[in-house]
Image: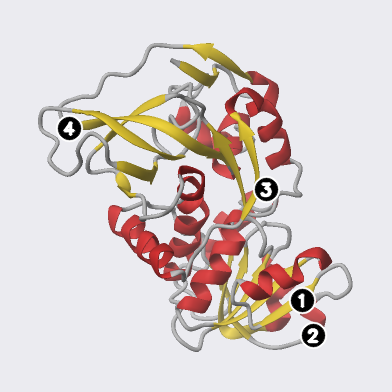
Amino acid sequence: MNAAIYTQYGPPDVVRLADIPTPIPKHDELLVRVRASTVNRTDTGFRSAEYVVSRLFSGILKPTFPVLGCEFAGEVVEIGADVTLFKPGDRIFGFDDERFGGHAEYLTVSQHAAIATIPEGWSYDQAAPLTEGSHYALGNLRAAGIKPGSRILINGSTGAIGSAAVQLSAYLGAEVTAVCATPHLDLVTSLGAHRVVDYTTTDVVSLGGEYDIVYDAVGKRRFRDFLPVMASDGIYMSTELGPKGENVWLALLHMRSRGKRVLFPIPKTTVEDILFIRELAVTGAFKPVFDRNYPLTNIIEAHRYVESGVKIGNVVIHIPS
């Protein structure tokens, strides 16, 4: 089968196309013909190993699983002997940041993994980006104890995680202030933000206010930057480790604190979360923001674009027949 593989850590150029064996499903696994995937920060982070700690999960010296692509959408073409939850012909989508595999024509996945059937009427390209940004955002918002009436500031509201966080926060009844650049003010407003601040003209901190949750969905600013606008028991979260890993250390330091503090939740993916996200997609409460589409043959360009820092929402990879 055709696949994009990487056998060493490094820049986008370490990714290359190769012909590799089609995987064989085990007794409790599905063989999925992948039709669409994405390139996202999870993929590029594991590929670059910029944070060395990622190698504890992907392989110390070289990648254990050479095919990236944590999100995927496709058709079940074969099932193992013990599979009862899905059948050949089912259209499914899902997330796997342990074995990855979406950047290939086929992958295998457990029937009990974080997968679900694609909503009726949704294309593979629409379904592929349903999970990465949304499950990270959902896990962080829940860890912060978001509830109706919570005042949340979302910095970086146009990426896959940030745009999902805006929609999920609004759905959960929070009062959402979102930060983005001038060209995207209308987009972020349409996602459900109650107030949108243009960071190119205004520092949101200078506007004052008091937030129960500050969520830096791009990891561009530090905990100390937001202290003036955090509630007395406010929570700061970031999608990045911060300078010298400060967000992790501050989270540990603040574990027993009741004042302004940092949380750094460990991401976890469950079937229940995927089904919840699917339900929101069906009702229209959540829709992944789409940026652009690349064929698998242009996978290196996709990696470069995602790392450029200008990506809006999701970059979809089309896996041709």
Which residue is labeled 3 in the image?
A: 244
Which residue is labeled 4 in the image?
A: 28
Q: From mark 1 to mark 3, how far is it between C-alphas?
A: 29 Å
Q: Name the spot of residue 212 as percent of width and height, x first.
A: 56, 82
Residue at 51% x, 62% y is 287
Q: Which mark is residue 311?
A: none
Q: Is residue 115 left or right of residue 71?
A: left
Q: Which mark is residue 197?
A: 1
Image mark count: 4
Q: Local crowd at mark 1 within 10 Å, few (<14), some, or many (≥20)?
A: some
Sequence order check, earlier mark of 3 and 2: 2
Do residues under tags 1 and 2 come within 8 Å of each other at their CB atoms? Answer: yes
Q: Could you tell me which quadrant the N terminus lies in?
A: top left
Q: Residue 207 carries which label?
A: 2
Q: From mark 4 to mark 3, how far is it between C-alphas?
A: 42 Å
Q: Local crowd at mark 2 within 10 Å, few (<14), some, or many (≥20)?
A: few
